[in-house]
Amino acid sequence: MPNFIKVAEVSDIPPGTAKVVEVQNVEVALFNLEGQIYALDNMCQHAGGPLGEGKIKEDVVICPWHGYRYHIKTGRYVKNPDMSVACYPVQVEDGKIAVSVTQ
Ligand code: FES
């Protein structure tokens, strides 16, 4: 069952930027794409690079270590869906962001 935990304020993450937070011992990268918040596992499937520190290009984040690209809205690795990262559900209420890392 999803367990939404408040982790940040929308105002902490201007559009086009990201922020890394910890949710129940999971590092999560929050992205603001044109005002919509998305949450991905922060750890790149290649060698664990921090996706929350990656460059954002349209709706894709580029891993800062070796350039793997993931769709921010789904966590899908652009070249190989089998190497996607987890995409977590997000709730936004009164400017506060809550994320669930449990099903
Ligand atoms: S660790 Fe992300 S591309 Fe290598």
Image (cartoon, rainbow, N blue to C red):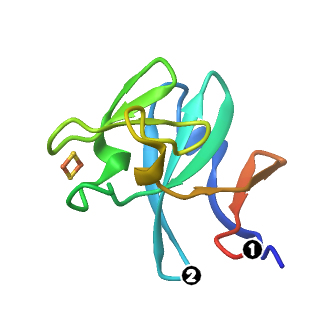
Q: Splitting the image into 4 quarters, where does residue 70 fall?
A: top left
User: Eyeballing the image, is 74 above or below 86?
Assistant: above
**Mark 2 surroundings: few (<14), some (14-19) or many (≥20) residues within 10 A:** few
Q: Return the x and y of residue 65 as percentages of the image width and height.
A: 15, 45
In the rendered structure, find residue 103 and report the number of the disc placed on it: 1
Q: Sequence-wise, which precedes: disc 2 or disc 1?
A: 2
86 relative to 88 in the view: left or right: left
Q: Return the x and y of residue 90 as percentages of the image width and height.
A: 73, 53
| Residue in front for this viewpoint, 5 or 42 | 42
Element under label 1? loop
| Residue in front for this viewpoint, 99 or 7 | 99
| Residue in front for this viewpoint, 82 or 1 | 82
In the rendered structure, find residue 25 and report the number of the disc placed on it: none
Q: Quadrant of the N terminus?
A: bottom right
Q: CA distance from mark 2 to mark 1?
A: 13 Å
| Residue in front for this viewpoint, 10 or 56 | 56
Q: Splitting the image into 4 quarters, where does residue 5 fall?
A: bottom right
User: Eyeballing the image, is 2 above or below 18?
Assistant: below
Q: Return the x and y of residue 72 as percentages of the image width and height.
A: 53, 37
User: Eyeballing the image, is 91 above or below 7?
Assistant: above
Q: Is mark 2 within 8 Å of ligand 1?
A: no
Q: Amino acid at mark 2?
A: Gln
In the rendered structure, find residue 24 and report the number of the disc placed on it: 2
User: Eyeballing the image, is 43 above or below 10?
Assistant: below
Q: Quadrant of the C terminus?
A: bottom right
Q: Residue at x 52, y 45 (%)?
A: 75
Q: Residue at x 24, y 55 (%)?
A: 46
Q: Mark 2 near mark 1, Cβ–Cβ under 8 Å? A: no
Q: How many dots with numbers?
A: 2
Q: Residue at x 56, y 81 (%)?
A: 24
Q: Residue at x 32, y 57 (%)?
A: 45
